Amino acid sequence: MTYSEPARTTTRRVRIRRIRVAGLLVVIAAIAAALGYQSLPSSSSTAASPIDVLRGEHRGLRSEHRGALGEAGGAVPDGTTVFDDEVPGVANLDPALLRALRRAATDAAADGVRFVVNSGWRSPAYEEQLRREAIARYGSAAEAARWVATGTTSPHVSGDAVDIGPADATPWLSAHGAAYGLCQIYGNEPWHFELRPDAIAHGCPSMYSDPTQDPRMQK
Ligand SMILES: [Zn+2]
């Protein structure tokens, strides 16, 4: 198999460069948000999810790190959908959330919109790994807390949250999600949805600007 080595090295270099570019975009988005531009819908809906960036790094590590960072710990393969029962990150979601997501995804497909799951259920160890990486990326635990919760506070760990992509799918869910009880919770995370059954009758509750405003994160 040595003949494939040069090609693989090239692929890896390209991937690393892409991750660097994505990381730069996240930093720019974070600076823009800090300057008060977070309400600009065009910038927030197209910004790369920091989790996508961290997942991109995990993809490179996947062959060496199984367990906590592998699929069993909640990492999801590219292109995973809400119908992929064999992926623990999907299968371990709250059943009511999963039912709502499947109804929404079916109706979205009729509109030509396809959801993928970028992140769903996460083990506490995977959440903590993402948090450590976010602290390294953002330079402080306080800034990282705006993007990644802890292993004990994260609604991803309890199976109550899902990060939906790609960027052209999240506007569909923002517009139609309330009818399924699916709500965006944080202003800075247009990809993060949770089940709020009351939204079907009353619409989604107002968003927190970021997770640090969420009382659940104060525990
Ligand atoms: Zn999320």
Image (cartoon, rainbow, N blue to C red):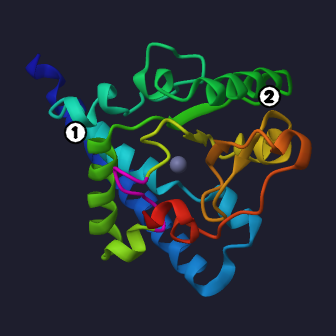
- What whole-number distance in Å separates the C-alpha atoms at marks 1 and 2? 33 Å
Image coordinates for residue 14, horizontal then vertical, percent: 34, 46
Q: Is residue 99 left or right of residue 202?
A: left
Image coordinates for residue 43, horizontal then vertical, percent: 68, 66
Residue at point 33%, 37% (across, down): 123
**Residue 106 lies in quadrant:** top right
Image coordinates for residue 133, horizontal then vertical, percent: 28, 58
Residue type at mark 1: give it. Leu
Is residue 116 shown above or below 49? above
User: Is residue 14 visible from the viewing direction of this image?
Assistant: no
**Residue 44 lies in quadrant:** bottom right
Q: Magenta region, mostly helix, strand or loop? A: loop
Q: Is residue 109 left or right of residue 133?
A: right
Q: Quadrant of the C terminus?
A: bottom left
Mark 2 closeness class: few <14, some 14–19, many ≥20 residues within 10 Å: some
Q: How many marks?
A: 2
Residue at point 72%, 27% (across, down): 100
Residue type at mark 2: give it. Ala
Q: Secondary structure at mark 2?
A: helix
Is residue 54 shown above or below 113? below
The residue under label 1 is 61
The residue under label 2 is 108
Residue at point 64%, 70% (across, down): 209
Q: Is residue 178 left or right of residue 121?
A: right
Residue farthest to the bottom?
Answer: 35
Specify start and end residues of the magenta stretch as a single range: 146-153
Residue at point 72%, 43% (across, down): 196
Nearer-the-camera pick, 166 or 1: 166
Image coordinates for residue 84, horizontal then vertical, percent: 53, 16
Q: Secondary structure at mark 1?
A: helix
